[in-house]
Amino acid sequence: MRVGVLTGGGDCPGLNAVIRAIVRKGIPEYGFSFLGFRDGWRGPLDGLTRPLDIPAVRGLLPRGGTILGSSRTNPFAIEDGVDRIRTNLMNFGVEALIAIGGEDTLGVAAKLHEVGVNVVGVPKTIDNDLSGTDYTFGFDTAVNIAMEAIDRLHTTAESHHRALIVEVMGRHAGWIALHSGMAAGANAILIPEVRFDIAQVCKWVESRFRLDYAPIIVVAEGARPKDGDEVLLTGEKDAFGHVRLGGIGDYLAREIEARTGKEARTTVLGHVQRGGTPTAFDRWLATRFGLHAIDAVHQGTWGMMTALRGTDIVTVPLLEATKEPKLVDPALYAEAEVFFG
Amino acid sequence: MRVGVLTGGGDCPGLNAVIRAIVRKGIPEYGFSFLGFRDGWRGPLDGLTRPLDIPAVRGLLPRGGTILGSSRTNPFAIEDGVDRIRTNLMNFGVEALIAIGGEDTLGVAAKLHEVGVNVVGVPKTIDNDLSGTDYTFGFDTAVNIAMEAIDRLHTTAESHHRALIVEVMGRHAGWIALHSGMAAGANAILIPEVRFDIAQVCKWVESRFRLDYAPIIVVAEGARPKDGDEVLLTGEKDAFGHVRLGGIGDYLAREIEARTGKEARTTVLGHVQRGGTPTAFDRWLATRFGLHAIDAVHQGTWGMMTALRGTDIVTVPLLEATKEPKLVDPALYAEAEVFFG
Amino acid sequence: MRVGVLTGGGDCPGLNAVIRAIVRKGIPEYGFSFLGFRDGWRGPLDGLTRPLDIPAVRGLLPRGGTILGSSRTNPFAIEDGVDRIRTNLMNFGVEALIAIGGEDTLGVAAKLHEVGVNVVGVPKTIDNDLSGTDYTFGFDTAVNIAMEAIDRLHTTAESHHRALIVEVMGRHAGWIALHSGMAAGANAILIPEVRFDIAQVCKWVESRFRLDYAPIIVVAEGARPKDGDEVLLTGEKDAFGHVRLGGIGDYLAREIEARTGKEARTTVLGHVQRGGTPTAFDRWLATRFGLHAIDAVHQGTWGMMTALRGTDIVTVPLLEATKEPKLVDPALYAEAEVFFG
Amino acid sequence: MRVGVLTGGGDCPGLNAVIRAIVRKGIPEYGFSFLGFRDGWRGPLDGLTRPLDIPAVRGLLPRGGTILGSSRTNPFAIEDGVDRIRTNLMNFGVEALIAIGGEDTLGVAAKLHEVGVNVVGVPKTIDNDLSGTDYTFGFDTAVNIAMEAIDRLHTTAESHHRALIVEVMGRHAGWIALHSGMAAGANAILIPEVRFDIAQVCKWVESRFRLDYAPIIVVAEGARPKDGDEVLLTGEKDAFGHVRLGGIGDYLAREIEARTGKEARTTVLGHVQRGGTPTAFDRWLATRFGLHAIDAVHQGTWGMMTALRGTDIVTVPLLEATKEPKLVDPALYAEAEVFFG
């Protein structure tokens, strides 16, 4: 059997490790051959391919990014998209497809399964907000990168009198902020799931200064203040039509300076969080997802994706992952609040 | 209520994070006061203490080791040991005890619980071989350290023609070898659970050399060859009464050189694996274990220990953790074997 | 003899290593005693002290920040400032002073030397822009932190189609940008010493995109465009009196998006660059500066500071360090330009 | 002009960075073309080549190892070796050669220069023991790796009561031991240049234990005890013809245990020190060596090698590097001794 493989959506450490594991097991164990599709769904749509054999995956385990490239192309938003994919799969002799991606990529996979394409999914999101699995690979790497940055701020915070703000990824879910903030001892963690009260944030800042330590605040990029405060961020236009610079981290710095009279400085980690070599946990998870995905292909359990439950890899319906995002549980956020201020 | 805290057994990144979380929640939330007992069970046995309040735990989160010190003292092996502990707890006004440790430390805790001492346990072992919990803290740190070392060997392995051996911790269980070897792409992983065939190891070595890559072998310190081959290791005396130097890694290097005619070099990571700052996963797990341990004290659920199940922290009977070690499952080892050779 | 020690100016990895070396050599070798002055020149000005003996410096070598605290207080800007310092030194029995700091701190030291105070200086600036020494400690650490961040962006850059901008420290000198950009393979490096042409930057961006790689631009926070383009940055007010958010990195992102039509994302490393544990080079340099500073005190060579020349530690007049900043040599910048675009 | 490039001797982080810089400058700036010779001097000897253009060097900057491979082949030890090299260079149209390597590789280069081959050298040794240059690339990386390992041991050392020994590279020169031991706060540093007194080492160990800290000893693999103590190490045969396991680190552990009655544990870093991605300093140095080597080719200054003097790259005669090794200066070792015990 010839199996196609593609990666879709945002970058994530571990993608290459999944691809490697699929190929390293699929060829000797099941006698499969593989075809890489490039740039997410654009690959099967436009017939963009890349050979995928054992030499092609050598050295991939520690490498960030994806050798297959990625895109956010949605074949269901394109006329004849699904038919073109079917035709291309047939022309290339590809009988099964492994789609590695997040909500959007797996959503397409679920729909293709419904119309009869043999698909197995591998869940991927650096934000850890996919339902149906305990964790997704890439998340542990992002959390460690953010934690190391916050660790470095602590020594500065002990010697100086500035509020230090770290803006991390997370538009809709605060997992990276929560885990890295808790792992690195942040004095406040602001997440999209809970609108923050800027006055309360300033109280935490001031209580920390009274202990003669500089406060460290971790904020997810999607966190927003409680009241409809006119927060104009990067790319948005103000009342005079001027494009604004700066994100929520810059907003916090400005507000804290204005309200407490203390200096504040912002670190914006940006894409640094989604690049580079994966941690051991992410390589382990990605490798096992790859091994179990090719087992699922061998067993013909279509329409499923791999998932982590405790220390076991299981398969769950693709639909389970794509129905609603996994947000931070208020009880878990309450555990972190013990350390605020 | 006054709560005693102690740490026993081998060193492990995350011990200080547990202590910090216990104190940071226990004082403001439950109004507890704390007393640190020094050097494991020797502390309550001999009345060795250390103050434990909020200033005492400042800055502890990222620090390896344990501020309370540790030992392998077993009060049940000492005459009047249990009575002396009871008396000291009473004299210090300590009504409950949190014992953080491995099989031995928690075994003592379980027995003390049986004789009426109010004990809650927190499981700890860098080897990850305690039953009842998905993971213990410290393990993820050790695996990442070993993985980074193996990563570095890969570039050397590509340029030269030597077999490279990495000896990692694990006397009875091969978890560190398995996870680090799989995360870093080892060409063979040798664990205590499965006796290895030195001839097979040499075949993997040679098949790797034929691809023009140098083989990398990860071996747990407790791994042993199949046949009763005369493997004399560090500290053991040979037939002439001479004390031997070198461990299983040195044995492998010698055998591979003799059998394949290729050079072999050994890295022995030793205590490097159990020192230094914990990873984000281990700080997260240790912090949550601390928070839930103090909740258990508050609720009076004695004789239990905290445990990780998926993403949840639960409590399980102390006896569950101490009945038998958690060894590597053959099915899991088989997943790794896909990548051997 | 009793020797006072103080640290002034911005935070810098290696400060604690200097303090440790001074004390570890000064006490057993020369029989000196020490007194720590807190918060830079505010310490001797207001009589703020901290004991400084061998137990006080234990464990300091790997720790970022400074146990003595710091400030930007200038005693020459305060009425009677110099007299208060003299009086306090006399009252504390302090006969010599080691001042560890940058241009400002050492400038004060030079003036105090002129009025008869026994001062030895140790140069410190994370920006590496002090004359008279090949390098200052802290710089190597900052460069490695920035390099690791850029390394991580490269894998993302290979998988996606975005321009990635990294804003690093350097208000007046571009050393960190130059070294980290060159070490990590940036496609453009923008420094304060050379005004950049935004059109040229966009050409480099586009030529990189044509190779199907995403461009990475490293910009020092003090870099500015050639023409007097209206660049309003953090804290500055626009024509309508609105405070702006965002720095030069945000400006570049906005301009590149507007001029090339490609997405751009910015990472602002901020204080992360000046925190945390020093690299081996910085610990080595800081330790040797400390050892040679206390030798200078022993020899009574006042008015001098330690300096690195090749692999030797020498002493040079304090005035040499403070006369003018060490800027990036155009010939060196030209070496880096080979790799632009 | 067509320029050949080869790398010889042991592995070293930064080799690829040199190759990249040579090509990235040589092609656009001077219009050169390049040919890679594989496996050190075996390449020009046997006509083993590899294409070397701009796409071939993409992504090389952070990669350890060498894409050209290496060997210890000496053409002067082979009959007709020099003639075969001359003939091959002529056949391939190669008019100049850049040889990147250590004492042996550069020694061959110097002799080839004497017989009229156009050679430029780039010095390389992880051990930092080449004369004529302040530092060689790879050394800073090795020192940081060793330092990080020792850092991790410190937390363990605080919690337990064991002597911890770290065996690092250095057969003839103790630079790695000296720099890493000094940067990480070792309690003793043993180097090949100074024979150690095992009784004195045990005194330092015991004085450290009295402070309730575990001692950490850094030992270069080539360090040896003072007296002709019967130290049989790896590969050597004892009086009964048995091959010994273990190196000088194991010897120290055994002696310390026997003489002090305390447990001792050894870490052998091995090839981990010479693998993986280079530090910023090493990438900077390697890149500049590459740029200046191709300038030297352009200027036709044959028989020279690049060298670091302070912050400048200069060229010095190849003979200067190969006449005698650069050993640790006793004055420098004395600086480190301040911290022993």
Image (tube, coloured by chain):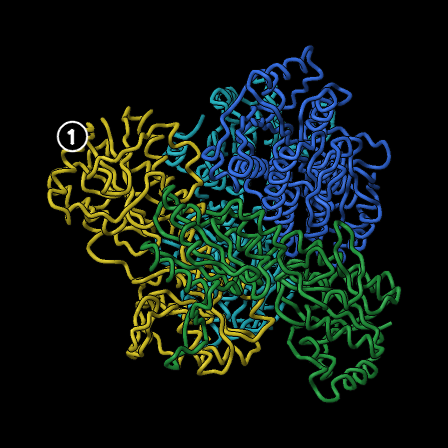
Chain colours: A cyan, B yellow, C blue, D green
User: On what subunit does the disc labeled 1 rest?
Assistant: B
Q: Amino acid at mark 1?
A: Met
Secondary element under disc 1, as helix, strand or loop, is helix
- Which quadrant is the C terminus of chain A positioned in? top left
Query: On screen, A25 above or below C189?
Result: below
Q: Quadrant of residue B218?
A: bottom left
Residue displayed at 76% across by 42% down: C256
Query: On screen, B119 above or below A264?
Result: below
Of B313 and C20, nearer the camera is C20
Of B313 and D162, nearer the camera is D162
**Crowdedness near tag 1: few (<14), some (14–19) or many (≥20) residues, C-alpha within 10 Å:** few
Q: In this view, which residue lies farthest toward the bottom?
A: D79
Query: On screen, C99 above or below C17?
Result: above
Residue D99 image position (x, y, % from top left): 74, 70
Query: On screen, A165 above or below B106?
Result: above
Q: Which residue is mark 1?
A: B90
Position of D119 with respect to D103 (left or right) is: right
Residue B167 image position (x, y, % from top left): 42, 65
Residue D84 image position (x, y, % from top left): 77, 86
Of C48 and D332, nearer the camera is D332
The answer to whether residue A11 shows anywhere in this view is no
The answer to whether residue B78 shows anywhere in this view is yes
Position of D57 with respect to B114 (left or right) is: right
